[in-house]
Structures are given as C-alpha cells and as structure tokens.
Amino acid sequence: MLSVRKPSVRASYEYLVREVLEKGEDMRTEDGDICREIRNVVVEITNPRLKGISPKYPLGKNAVEQYTKNLLYGSENKFSYDYHSRLFKYPVNDRYINQIEYILEKLREEKNSRRAVAITWQPLIDIEVSKRRRGSVPCLQYIQFLIRDNKLHQTVLFRSNDLLLAYHANALGLIALGEMIAESLGVEYGTYTHHAVSMHLYIERDYDYISKYFPECLKYLR
C-alpha cells in the first residue's frame, strides 16, 4: 500500500511513476502483458485548482482535454462502455438513471449526506464482457462526494489504473467533474482523493515512453 499527499495531479504523477518503477512488483496480466504494480495506492490532491500538465506525461494536453470532454459530455465512439453514459445514463432494465443528477439532489437536500455516490460497474454487461475477454470493462468503479466545512470533497476508486498513460488524464478529468458539481451546489471544491487498487505501468509495452520521459528510472528496469 502507498499513501501520497501532493498539491497537484502533476506533482503526484511524477512522484508515483518513480515510486512504482522503483518499488513496484512485476506481474503478468490476464492479457499476457508485464506490469509493474503497487496495490492500493491512495493519492490526495490538496489543491486541485493547480491543473498544470506534466511535461513528462507522454500523451500530453490533447489526451487530457479529450478525456475530460468525453467524461462530461459523452463520445460518439462506440465502446463496450463509456464513463459519461454510466454516470449520466446508467442502464437499469428498460430505463436509465442519471447518477450525477441524483448526487446534486441528495447534497442539496442534505449537505452532510454520505450517500452521494455513483457507480459504473453494470453486472449484466460487464461480467459477460469480462468472461469473453473481448472489449473493455470500466476501470473507474466508484465516485463519492462529501460536503464538509462548505467544501466539496471527491473520492474515486479505480479497480485498475494505467499510471503512465491514463492516471494524469483520469484525475484531471474527474476533478473537472467535481468542479462542475461544486459550482452547481454553490460550494467551493475541496480535495480530490484517488484510490487505485492496482496502480501499474506496462514496462515492456511502454518501455520507449519510460526511456524518453523517465530516463532516470531505467536503472530500475535492469
């Protein structure tokens, strides 16, 4: 387990990549890839208004902007899932539930509520996709919002998180969602906490990226 507190996503990203490369354990995924992993990484971002993008993030600004846009407004691309639909249009039998609307209603009704939560896993869909090993299932599983001291605090849970290529965009996109909710509620956005059950890097697949952006860490791959 690793617990980290940093002021910004950028600072946490650069720190975590080095930590996982140095201290993580290698494992082979069910798809046959070699990952270096630390289990149960919890990151608290204390000043999420600091939204700078690390120059060490291989996919850069465009990836962050595209992820944020897709999360908040949806995507025309067809996947086995997308987070916008699971959050704003969660499928239940022959109807859909807007979980973000529920969160807003719940916190307007009772600002101290601990029930302002949203999930993405849809068993009828995702279990079958997982069994077939064709298509993707959600990495982001759960989001919760708490209002404390008139600030909105956000916690998210990922079952699995690609640290090198996904974490940076994931965190900044989800912070944008939290800020949108805070603005709708008329409260200040507080902290962002990101829990990844498996925080990992693909050390063979992404070796060239590691070599280019984190050359000081190559000694941990020998």
Image: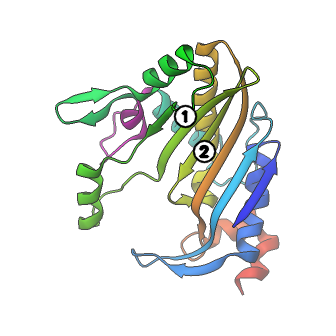
Q: Which portion, as a residue range, is magenta?
A: 73-87
Q: Label 1 amino acid?
A: Thr
Query: Residue 56: image x %, image y %?
Result: 74, 55
Please say which color scheme the image uses.
Answer: rainbow
Which image quadrant is residue 137 in?
bottom left
Side of 50 where 34 appears, left or right: left
Q: Residue at x 35, y 56 (%)?
A: 136
Query: Dot 2, how many residues are within 10 Å of its Cα: few (below 14), some (14-19), or many (20+)?
Result: many
Q: Is residue 69 above or below residue 59?
A: above
**Who is closer to the viewer here, 69 or 55?**
69
Query: Dot 1, how many residues are within 10 Å of its Cα: few (below 14), some (14-19), or many (20+)?
Result: many
Q: Sequence-wise, which precedes: disc 1 or disc 2?
A: 1
Q: Is residue 44 magenta?
A: no
Side of 96 where 155 appears, left or right: right
Q: Which residue carries the number 2 mark?
A: 169
Q: Is residue 186 above or below residue 180?
A: above
Q: Are marks 1 and 2 in contact (CB under 8 Å)?
A: yes
Which image quadrant is residue 128 in?
bottom left
Q: Is mark 2 on a helix, strand or loop?
A: helix
- Mark drawn on residue 68: 1
Separation of disc 1 and disc 2 at Cα?
8 Å
Query: Residue 149: image x %, image y %?
Result: 76, 23
Going by the picture, which residue comes out furthest to the left?
94
The quarter in which the N terminus is drawn is bottom right
Magenta stretch, overall SS: loop
Q: Label 2 amino acid?
A: Ala
